[in-house]
Image: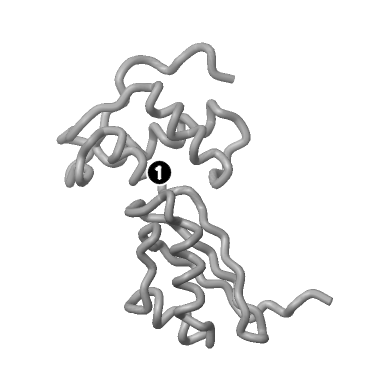
Amino acid sequence: MAKEIAGLIKLQIKGGAANPSPPVGPALGSKGVNIMDFCKQFNARTQDKAGKVLPVVITVFSDKSFSFVVKQPPVAILVKEAAKVQTGSAEPNRKKVASITWEQVRAIAKEKMPDMNAFTEKSAMSMVAGTARSMGINVEGSFPADVQ
């Protein structure tokens, strides 16, 4: 018989750096989850992505056990890494802070595709390009013709 789900918790934690301090501790403690057990499992599973901010969805069951799914980093963070900037523009419609190429957009879209609400590479690329534009980052060149 399946376990009864008591709740879902969505957090963004740096890979390999989960600790019981806020926001992790209070979010898990309120549901009765063993905080240190989660931290150890999360850190072990995300050693290869150390330092990157990773969204995690924690499913808490009625017997206080849990399972969690680690997702890809948010598109905005991947775009900032590709453009080599710390932050986006405060006025994205007026001040552009950097630029990226369509090849970088394609690489980000392919990496993020399992977590995105897109069925084709073309639609995923346009979503990534839109995020970049809203951050004040130009996308250089024209949309590639070989994308379906």
Q: Amino acid at mark 1?
A: Val
* Outermost residue, top side: 145
Q: Which residue is mark 1?
A: 75
Look at the numbered disc 1 and give the secondary structure of its residue. helix
Residue sitting at 17 percent across and 35 percent down? 97
- Residues 7 and 1: in front is 1
Give the x, y percent position of residue 40: 46, 71
Say how many tags the image has. Answer: 1
In the picture shown, does residue 58 fall above or below 79?
Answer: below
Farthest residue to the right: give it.
1
Q: Residue at x 40, y 22 (%)?
A: 103
**Quarter of the image where the N terminus is located:** bottom right
Report the coloring of the rendering: one colour
Would residue 7 be found to the left or right of residue 99 on screen?
right
- Residue at image location 65% in from the left, 79% down from the top: 61
101, above or below 46, in the image: above
| Percent x, y of residue 98 | 20, 31
Q: Residue at x 32, y 54 (%)?
A: 51
In the rendered structure, the answer to whether residue 143 lies left or right of residue 85 reads right
Q: Is residue 17 above or below residue 64?
A: above
9 vs 126: above or below: below
Residue 107 drawn at (x, y percent): 44, 29
- Residue 66 as seen in the image, left or right of residue 126: right
State the quadrant of the C terminus: top right
Q: Position of residue 12 (x, y in %)?
A: 40, 62
Label 1 neighbour load within 10 Å: few <14, some 14-19, many 20+: many
Q: Quadrant of residue 136?
A: top left
- Residue situated in front as seen by the camera: 131 or 71: 71
